[in-house]
Image (cartoon, rainbow, N blue to C red):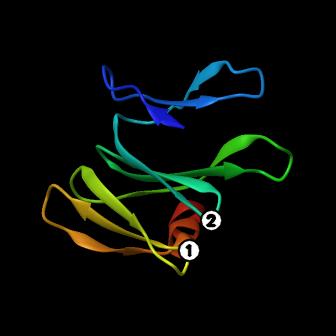
Amino acid sequence: AAIDPATDEVFMIDSKDALLPLPIPKANVIISVSGNFWIGTTDGLYVFGDNGEGKMVELASISIAGSIIQLIPLLDDNAAFISDAGFAGVVELSQVFSAFEQ
């Protein structure tokens, strides 16, 4: 995954080396946590990963106040975040899944 510096769009590269844009808001940061891509955007956090069939899909997302300006991978497979609204915290993937399912 990569962020296009001109448009802030996120692209993945498929098995044929074609660029595939992800349908999410403008991104500020991408990190890898346990093989999943955590993407901080202008309206929250998105997690993309393998669906078990070799396809990259959105696993979860959560809205967080402010634009996510930094994500920090943690050793317990979670991530710390900082938003431009002054919020900081830790997001556990299990929390994101719970919010995504509701």
Can you say whether 92 is above or below 14 in the image?
below
Q: Secondary structure at mark 1?
A: loop
Left or right position of 71 against 58: left
Res 7 → quadrant: top left
Task: Find disc 2 in the rendering and name its residue.
Answer: 34
Please report the residue visible at 77 percent of the width from the left and 40 percent of the height from the top: 55
Residue type at numbered disc 2: Ser
- Number of other residues with Cα within 10 Å of mark 2, as a class: few under 14, some 14 to 19, many 20 or more: some
Q: Nearer the viewer, residue 73 or 51?
A: 73
Please report the residue visible at 77 percent of the width from the left and 51 percent of the height from the top: 51
Task: Find disc 1 in the rendering and name its residue.
Answer: 77
- Mark 1 and mark 2: Cα distance apart in space: 6 Å
Q: Nearer the viewer, residue 62 or 13?
A: 13
> Pointer 1 and pointer 2: residues touching (CB < 8 Å)?
yes
Residue 45 percent across, percent down from the top left: 41, 54
- Number of other residues with Cα within 10 Å of mark 1, as a class: few under 14, some 14 to 19, many 20 or more: some
Residue 32 percent across, percent down from the top left: 53, 56
Residue at the extreme right of the image, as rendered:
53
Please report the residue visible at 55 percent of the width from the left and 61 percent of the height from the top: 100
Q: Nearer the viewer, residue 33 or 98?
A: 33
Left or right position of 74 against 19: left
Tally of numbered discs: 2
Badge number at residue 33: none
